[in-house]
Image (spheres, coloured by chain):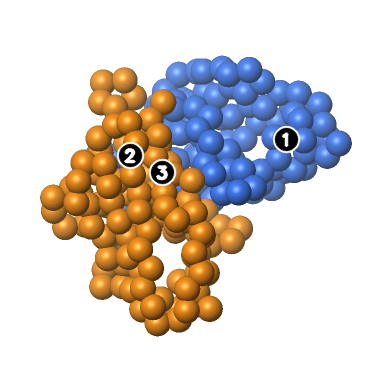
Amino acid sequence: GAVVSQHPSWVICKSGTSVKIECRSLDFQATTMFWYRQFPKQSLMLMATSNEGSKATYEQGVEKDKFLINHASLTLSTLTVTSAHPEDSSFYICSAPGLAGQAPYEQYFGPGTRLTVT
Amino acid sequence: GIQVEQSPPDLILQEGANSTLRCNFSDSVNNLQWFHQNPWGQLINLFYIPSGTKQNGRLSATTVATERYSLLYISSSQTTDSGVYFCAVGTGGFKTIFGAGTRLFVKA
């Protein structure tokens, strides 16, 4: 099946710094990728849709200037948390839809990145 | 937007017991997936099932799209089945929305 990777798997940063998280589709191309955030004991909340070659689309309530998304190629999307604060500490997960024609809307998820802001 | 409700929110089973998890959704969907989230946070794809019935070992799932619900059956539960089970749906395009999950604990 399709494989999605994320890097890093965990990161600790100081308050006020920026952190970049990468999401890669390893064996397929993805013109669209999604970023989710999950707080402890809660569900996954969709943050934004990453579109290759164009601007990301953010869900209501998500600060686009704080969570910068870049989808520079058909296999890579990056999420940069700018001026991170402790309340940004969370588990960030990306996904990409699978291959068209088989299960075209099936989502494949990365392993997640645990961010801790001190 | 679409609403996704999962029940029960929590479930405790004795090893060997069977269980049924339910997912109700408020609109037509083009995608429905069941996931198991392991203790490290990884989402394990269980089923891609926008309609119909599928089985994989001790697990099976049924989606009745016209009535807007899906069921996940776990038979002969094992302690390794413990974790959180999520239902996630998509409507138009690829955007996928998650339910709140069912937290399952299987006792030895």
Query: What whole-number distance in Å separates the C-alpha atoms at marks 3 and 1?
Result: 24 Å
Work out whether residue B74 can be spotted.
yes
B52 displayed left or right of B10: left
Residue tagged 3:
A5
Query: What whole-number distance in Å separates the C-alpha atoms at marks 2 and 3?
Result: 6 Å
Residue A56 position in % (x across, y down): 21, 57
Work out whether residue B30 can be spotted.
no
Residue displayed at 45% across by 81% down: A15
Chain for mark 1?
B
Do marks 1 and 2 both belong to one polypeptide chain? Answer: no
Residue displayed at 75% across by 29% down: B77
Query: What whole-number distance in Å separates the C-alpha atoms at marks 1 and 2?
Result: 29 Å
Q: Quadrant of residue A21 in the image?
A: bottom left
Residue A46 position in % (x across, y down): 38, 54
Residue tagged 2:
A25
**The chain in blue:** B
Which mark, by number, is residue B80? 1
